[in-house]
Image: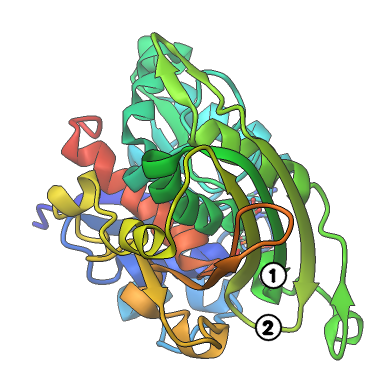
């Protein structure tokens, strides 16, 4: 019998669900034991139900698994959730109430005061919020979330600066890949040869999530960071990888070489604990003037490293630079798997 922890995937057939299956195929601690999606998929084999869109084949054992109904009966105690926010708001609490550890990708509960929103390299201490959740007290279940796919790259680039120099103002303009909209996502006739300057609720999520992630634990609450923040979000015809043009004003003066050193030397608990999905380098600065680019740099650190480049003075704020992060790996499935690894390392998976 396997000694790995059995895990389930809610929303297993979607863009993020597929990444979970790919990332968990050879995971040293977790093993996919249960899959669920909508009524459309229920009862079918996974190979029949999912329109598999990744370059690696569906793992054989998973291809033959039946898609279960999305109810807690018969589900394992650890659930990775990749549901649309509307249905997540209904189902995630149901699974937590039934005693499951719900490791969620969705925005439904991210900003709830007792739900941790975590990037393990940035705010691992926020997982303590779990202890205050009613589900935890009643059934042992709980919900932990990872941020929106564009907030995560931004925050990984900001955290090393925030620690060394403090942040006063942040402005970010995104160029977001089509895979960020799920499958089938944006119609090809809408996006080919085009830029769509609107992604529903994305700017609000980036602004509020960034402040919660860089906020401080105070007793049983997170006090959000107070820097001024403005985000503008665009959808572009790129398959995977969100690129962001960022300008910052810092609290203390910084030289460019100090900022680059802050990024390149950034390490945190996941690296110290050697969590299986933690990249050796969470952030890497590119010296070349035309990098990072999604086509060449998105798979750095197996998709878990955030790339930064083009650091230069800003005529309005202090500095401007470019950030690139893989939206379905670091921005979704990989973020949740790393959160689950942190939970295990901290004794939250029983
Ligand atoms: N794509 C990204 O880059 C990204 C990044 C970060 C976060 N997220 C978030 O992750 C979540 C999933 O995104 P996605 O891109 O994977 O979406 P998606 O491709 O549209 O997949 C949605 C999944 O939810 C399932 N589902 C739909 N209605 C359901 C219901 N009533 N009951 C149970 N399952 C249901 C679908 O199953 P069927 O196949 O059976 O319909 C499918 O498995 C969203 O909240 C999204 O905002 C996505």
Mark 1 secondary-structure assignment = strand
- How crowded is the residue under tag 1: few (<14 C-alpha within 10 Å), some, or many (20+)? many
Q: Quadrant of ligand 1?
A: bottom right
18, 170: nearer the viewer? 170
The residue beneath circle 1 is: 176
Q: How many marks can you see?
A: 2
- Residue 223: x percent and y percent? 52, 19
Q: CA distance from mark 2 to mark 1?
A: 7 Å
Compared to residue 5, the image places residue 265 above or below, namely below
- Residue 167: x percent and y percent? 54, 39
- Residue 329 visible within the image: yes
Q: Which mark is residue 100?
A: none
**Which of marks 1 and 2 precedes in the sequence?**
1
Name the residue: 65% across, 73% down: 179
Marks 2 and 1 in Cβ contact (< 8 Å): yes
Which image quarter holds the C terminus?
Answer: top left
The residue beneath circle 2 is: 238
105, 139: nearer the viewer? 105
Which image quarter holds the N terminus?
Answer: bottom left
Name the residue: 61% across, 27% down: 226
- Residue 308: x percent and y percent? 47, 70
């Amino acid at each position: 019998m396997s000694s790995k922890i059995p895990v389930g995937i809610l929303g297993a057939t979607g863009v993020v669900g597929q990444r979970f299956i790919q990332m968990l195929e050879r995971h040293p601690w977790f093993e996919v034991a249960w899959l669920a999606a909508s009524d459309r998929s229920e009862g079918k084999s996974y190979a029949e139900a999912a329109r598999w869109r990744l370059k690696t084949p569906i793992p054989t054992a998973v291809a033959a698994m039946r898609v279960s109904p999305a109810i807690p009966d018969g589900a394992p105690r650890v659930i990775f959730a990749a549901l649309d926010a509307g249905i997540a708001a209904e189902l995630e609490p149901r699974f937590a109430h039934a005693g499951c550890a719900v490791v969620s990708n969705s925005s439904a509960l991210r900003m709830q005061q007792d739900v941790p929103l975590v990037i393990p390299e940035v705010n691992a201490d926020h997982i303590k919020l779990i202890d205050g959740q009613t589900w935890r007290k009643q059934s042992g279940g709980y919900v932990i979330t990872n941020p929106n796919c564009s907030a995560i790259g931004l925050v990984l680039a900001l955290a090393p600066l925030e620690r060394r120099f403090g942040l006063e103002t942040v402005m970010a303009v995104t160029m977001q890949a089509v895979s960020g909209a799920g499958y089938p996502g944006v119609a090809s006739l809408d996006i080919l040869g085009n830029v769509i300057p609107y992604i529903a609720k994305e700017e609000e999520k980036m602004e509020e999530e960034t402040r919660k992630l860089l906020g401080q634990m105070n007793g049983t609450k997170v006090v959000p960071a107070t820097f001024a923040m403005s985000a503008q979000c665009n959808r572009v015809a790129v398959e995977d990888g969100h690129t962001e043009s960022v300008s910052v004003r810092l609290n203390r003066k910084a030289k460019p070489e100090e900022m680059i050193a802050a990024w390149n030397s950034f390490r945190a608990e996941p690296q110290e604990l050697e969590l299986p999905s933690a990249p050796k380098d969470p952030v890497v600065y590119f010296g070349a003037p035309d990098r990072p680019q999604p086509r060449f740099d998105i798979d750095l650190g197996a998709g878990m490293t955030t790339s930064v480049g083009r650091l230069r003075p800003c005529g309005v704020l202090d500095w401007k630079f470019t950030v690139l992060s893989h939206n379905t790996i670091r921005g979704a499935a990989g973020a949740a798997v790393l959160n689950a690894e942190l939970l295990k390392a901290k004794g939250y998976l029983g």
